[in-house]
Amino acid sequence: MTNPTWDPGQYLRHADHRARPFTDLLARVPDLPARAPRIADLGCGPGNATVQLTRRWPTAHVTGYDNSPEMLDAAHTAHEGPTGGGGRLDFAHADVRSWRPGEPCDLIVSNATLQWVPGHADRFADWIDGLAPGGTLAFQVPDNIDAPLHALMRELAGTPRWKSRLVDVLRRTDSVFTPGAYLDRLARLGCATDVWQTTYLHVLPGADPVLDWVKGTGLRPALTALADDPEARDAFLAEYRDLLREAYPGAPYGTVMAFRRLFAVVVKET
């Protein structure tokens, strides 16, 4: 899979829909053990969702971590600084594949990031070890690699015209585990574990909104691989757009995109 180049502006075009699962995840996080908690957000992107942490825990010191310079620049500019409750929000570069807490955290969260991290389940033990007693690890990941928007992308990338450039750059079908596999892996680490799925029916406005959505996320590896050939990039997008129009027909009120996500909340023993 290609390490994609990210576009904060494109990602934020559907910010409300993208932020909702994080809101639902945080609603299941219990009280944290510290009055001024230390919180880490792994894969913070442009920081728009990370801000929710400062609203739930206004005295917290929250650090958002990401490996995209473009995303971090946007986060620094728009959100960094002291919070109204006496806490602080800042951002730093980190690779989730190797990140470990430099100090005990009361909460480690990750919002729609771990699907990009091969072997992420092998990191759980280190992250839980880095939690304070009674601390929480919470994450959500897209669980829709079998949905038409991904299946059609992979099928198109595997056709003779595109195979040599795209077939190995997209997310693998095993990039996210089953709910049962996550539950087993996390519960065996000695934590109270809650895992669930939710399917959102996003009603998207405008022309070709599913294409517009996926240009900010799942399509980024393909766009990165074709960045040096704008003509080829536009041709691929046109073919993919036509497939999406058939798979996601519009209605008078918008285009419905079903999107399943997987959630986990893990509480360390006190």
Image (tube, rainbow, N blue to C red):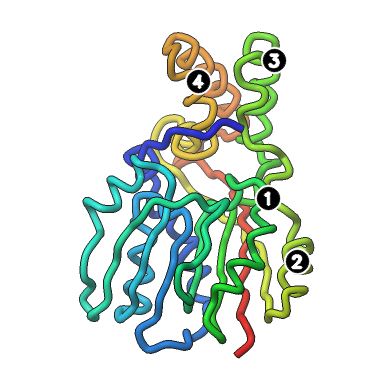
Disc nearer the start of the sequence (2/4): 2
Q: CA distance from mark 4 to mark 3?
A: 14 Å
Amino acid at the residue labelled 4: Leu
**Label 4 Cα neighbours within 10 Å, binned few <14 / some 14-19 / many ≥20:** some
**Residue at position x 78%, y 61% from top?**
181
**Residue at position x 43%, y 14% from top?**
228
Disc nearer the start of the sequence (2/3): 3
Q: Circle 4 sits on which residue? A: 237
Percent from the top left, x then y, of residue 200? 56, 55
Percent from the top left, x then y, of residue 102? 45, 68
Does 115 appear above or below 216?
below
Q: CA distance from mark 2 to mark 1?
A: 12 Å
Disc nearer the start of the sequence (2/1): 1
Foreground label between 1 and 3 = 1
Amino acid at the residue labelled 1: Gly
Disc 1 to disc 3: CB gap under 8 Å: no
Disc nearer the start of the sequence (4/3): 3
Q: Which mark is residue 159?
A: 3
Q: CA distance from mark 2 to mark 3?
A: 37 Å
Q: Compare residues 246 and 105 and report the one nearer the observer.
A: 105
